[in-house]
Image (cartoon, rainbow, N blue to C red):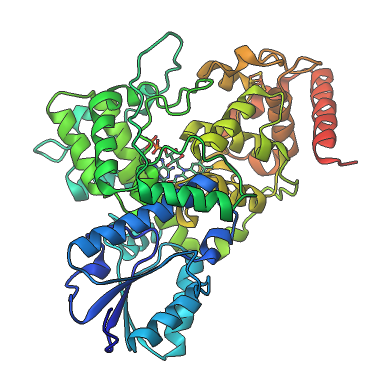
Amino acid sequence: MMAKNNKNLCLIFGDQLSHSISSLENISKTNDVVVMFEVLEENTHVKHHKQKIAFVLSAMRHFSEALKENGIPVYYVKIDDENNTQSLDGELNRAIQHFKSTKIILTEPSEFRVKEKINRWVADGRVTFEIRDDTRFLCSHSEFQNWAKNKNQLRMEFFYREMRKKYNILLDDSGKPLGGKWNFDKENRNPIKKNIAFLKKPYFEKDDITQEILNLVEKMFPDHFGSLNNFHWATTREQALALLNHFIDYNLNNFGDFQDAMLADEAFIFHSVLSPYINFGLLNPLEICKQVEYAYREGRVKLNSAEGFIRQILGWREYVRGIYWLNMPSYENKNYLSAKNKLPDFYWNANTDMNCLHQAIHQTHEFAYSHHIQRLMITGNFALLCGIDPKMVCEWYLIVYADALDWVELPNTLGMSLYGDGGLMASKPYAASGKYIARMSNFCDGCKYDPTLTVGEQACPFNFLYWDFAGRHEDKLKPNQRLAYTYANWKKMDPDIKKAIRKQAKAFLETLFGLT
Ligand code: FAD
Ligand code: SF4
């Protein structure tokens, strides 16, 4: 039985499962105790995918066991413990009373919602708080603020170059980018047209902890989105490291070339599927970048792949975190294009005759995963073209992906995908017609619609919706130089075709949203 003698509480959240987390630095095995809570509140503030809940709870339990094995005292509240108050506030209160604590040590929360909660505690003043920076991120808040200061546009590309320099990654001895360019993205847009072998990622035996959690999730969250049948997530750091090594050994070399490609019934292709491990703390972003660079320097992977992959983590991931904290809380209410439509039901059941959407949503249901281009150019693109309310779209993304946390989901969905921030993140909306989807995937082969047709019964909805979107938002978007080509084509389009496009889009949107 643990002594109740004024211990300091070292509070660890579910996305802080790193042995190197700042809150654990200099932990005293006699004066401090790690506290971890599984609470309903965190699992139901939105109704997370079943696999996501199972992944987080199992990873938390494994992490607490690993701490105990290292001799660190842990006070752990399970979600089905009889006296669990099921809220963070309630459990923190109970732990404070239990240990007669006067001090709480924690690493800053990653999400605004949780930070506000902690701020209320701090203001309350009953106990003192020591809140440490989250040093797992590679760019601190103040560094990002300094970089963003006095800039009209916050383009990721320039931020990324600074990060490459800061960490001396993929640079030659004189500090120039290897290969003479910072970015090899132009080489990374190939479709997969013929059979290319990719070695599927390993699956792990479910141990007793994971099996218990899977049963519990099925019992406690039966009406949440998603299936547990294909639960495929690693739940320990050792397993996550094995997946990282597998990715570097077998799939990274082709990651670059086929980064944007999409295939029916193949969710993962050459992607790493590491995001939940990075976001919840099982893997460290810098260790990944270093290992990928090492694989390149050893001649095991091509430069466009190594650079493309490192850019996602060192560039995009840090950049979206910077954007989030720079702009919250007002950011989440932005809606530049005044999109108001409701999220269609098929986002929950994949029941649509548009095969690309069916595939992306079905994969999401089965794996709590779909890769970036499916999120951006299929489900996101459709929501953008149809004018679906950003709040509903953001909630969907937060629910359905195992890697989703507000700080990373919100800028990606609202900013990058929906252009809801009016171009703070994206230099133009990621709007695309069915022709793009036909080029980058094989989805159209199994679809009742024809991606080469813009109007008529067989016309791909993405085609007429794309032009209708351009027409609808001409006032706001036409001045954007990056859309000059689109609006030049729109201008010279036959007026009868324009009329037919607008009519078909209107009928489609009315059927979908019941508008009049
Ligand atoms: P890979 O393609 O193998 O990329 C490697 C790593 O780079 C990822 O694991 C991830 O850590 C990082 N990364 C790549 N792109 C981004 C990005 N745009 N922002 C941040 N990190 C990036 N990512 C999340 O981690 N959580 C989210 O909730 C999330 N929501 C998204 C919503 C939308 C609408 C879009 C368009 C993208 C979203 N992303 C999100 C970014 C990206 O799609 C995922 O990180 C990626 O698909 C995860 O799969 P992977 O690990 O196989 O990535
Ligand atoms: Fe999607 Fe259109 Fe292709 Fe069908 S034809 S899969 S709706 S892009």
Is residue 191 visible to us here? Answer: yes
- Residue plotted at (69% across, 23% down): 463
- Residue plotted at (63% across, 47% down): 393
Question: Image quadrant of residue 157?
Answer: top left
Side of 151 where 351 appears, left or right? right
Name the quarter showing ligand 1: top left
Q: Position of residue 173 (x, y in %)?
A: 8, 38
Q: Position of residue 72 (x, y in %)?
A: 21, 69
Question: Image quadrant of residue 140?
Answer: bottom left
Q: Position of residue 503 (x, y in %)?
A: 85, 27
In this view of the protein, which residue sits in the foreground, 55 or 321?
55
Side of 349 where 250 appears, left or right? left
Q: Is residue 212 above or below residue 378?
A: below
Side of 248 where 347 appears, left or right? right
In this view of the protein, which residue sits in the foreground, 161 or 262?
262
Q: Position of residue 102 (x, y in %)?
A: 33, 89
- Residue plotted at (19% across, 73% down): 27
Q: Is residue 382 above or below residue 189?
A: below
Is residue 398 visible to us here? Answer: no
